[in-house]
Amino acid sequence: MVEMPGRIVILGAGHAGVECATALRARKFGGTVDLVGDDPHLPYQRPPLSKDYIKRPGDPLPLKPKQFFADNRITLRPGQRAAGIDRKRRQVRLESGEALPYDHLVLATGARNRRLHIPGINDGTAFELRTLADADRILGSIRDWRQVAIVGGGFVGLEAAALLTTMGIAVHVIETAPRLMQRTASPTLSSWFAEWHRENGTAVHLDTQVAAVEQEAARVVARLTDGNRLVADAAIVAAGVLPNVELAAAAGLAVGNGIVVDANLLTSDPAISAIGDCANFPSSRLPGRARLESVQNAADQARTVAARLTGETKPYDALPWFWSIQGGVRLQIAGLSKPGLSEVVRGDPDSGRFSVFLFDGERLTAVESVNAAADHMIARRLIAERRKVEPAGVGDLSLDLKSLL
């Protein structure tokens, strides 16, 4: 019989950490749960920050009401930062000097914005958009903005671009890769979104880097490697994230593009798990390992660990899915893409409602849906259940996708 831990400490109070604490109590875990987060606010949803929050500021959507933590005997410790992990004594040392003992430690330390090594980019001339403090800093200046340069053509950069253009702000998006969302989207989808953003007033600069950022009076000047010189009221850096692995590494845990875990999300120390944006796990959906940055992955991994800690152990094998809202366009992705997949388009991209089915040989591995929620929901089942799907058939609109189930 597996001995259940009596004291669980969770480092990180984002989606993964809060969901883990919630799932533990839902599964009748009777021990102590400490939830430590370095953000001073009540845990909140991050996705709205790059969408509606800037346009309609107010209280961010809480992950749980404040009373929830008290009612469920979850000791929430906001605004506290861990200084180190003592694996021998099984303690977490906080910067305040307090030591939290644990029987099991869950690392949900998340990720932070990638800092670019560009002259002038990090000396106060640029904004970021990951935390509530980042969003509030933008709100404090946005009334004076007429033109903005966004460095990064991924989800966050494009969501911010779409939002700012609806507010009458001219936007330039500068992307190092030859296409938008290259890491997560197919060439067809990237091309469609590039055209959509241009049609809606955003200037898209592909295969281009920022060589330097300079301050000129109250404005910033971005000098691009293609020779262009962009004068803007502000620059926003949205160039991806890096996993927060420093605590784990200092404690002697295996790290490498995240905190390395096994199929059960255990680290190299059996008393420590890692979940969410910081966890590098073996993937059954891609060859090798993966580290995913999504609410779905954070929540599903949190529930997997909570189940194991309460006696139900099974490998993590949830189907990844993602979403992005860019202006009036809702993008939903089921599964994981990779270079070299064949594409089958279902629907007419010119209509603004279509899906791209991605195949590895004859195996359906991912589906990207633009304003096609029904396609997305069926695709999630098709991929999760590993159904056989004929590539030649899904492009035919006369085929009812439900029949494939």
Image (cartoon, grey):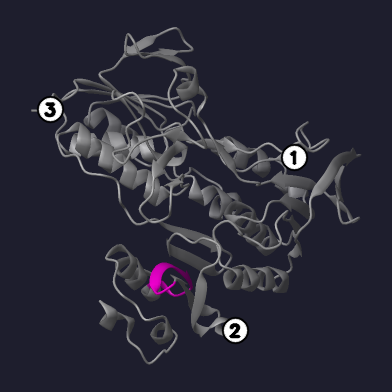
144 or 44: which is nearer to us?
A: 44
What is the secondary structure assignment of the residue under circle 2? helix
Query: Are dots 3 and 1 in contact, CB under 8 Å?
Result: no
In the rendered image, residue 37, in percent from the top left (x then y), is placed at 43, 27
Check if residue 235 falls in the magenta segment. Answer: no
| Residue drawn where x is 42% and y is 89% of the image | 396
Query: Magenta span: helix, strand or loop, mainly?
Result: strand
Q: Residue at x 45, y 85 (%)?
A: 395
Q: Which mark is residue 350?
A: 2
Q: Position of residue 125 (x, y in %)?
A: 79, 37
Q: Position of residue 388 (x, y in %)?
A: 31, 75
Q: Comparing marks 2 and 1, which lies closer to the viewer?
A: 2
Residue 221, relative to residue 206: is it above or below?
A: above
Q: Report which quarter residue 362 is drawn in.
A: bottom left
> In front here: 271 or 24?
271
Q: Residue at x 34, y 37 (%)?
A: 262
Residue at the bottom extreme of this rendering? 398
Q: Nearer the viewer, residue 265 or 275?
A: 265
State how far apart marks 3 and 1 are (Cα): 51 Å
Q: Quadrant of residue 131?
A: top right
Q: Is residue 256 left or right of residue 253?
A: right
What label does residue 2 carry, if any?
A: 3
Which of labels 2 and 3 is toward the front?
Answer: 3
Q: Amino acid at mark 3?
A: Val
Q: Earlier in the sequence, mark 2 or mark 3?
A: 3
Q: Which residue is denoted by mark 1 in the rendering?
A: 126
Amino acid type at circle 2 is: Asp
Q: Give the Cα separation between the discs numbered 2 and 1.
A: 36 Å
Residues packed near mark 2 inside 10 Å, few (<14), some (14 to 19) or many (20 plus): few
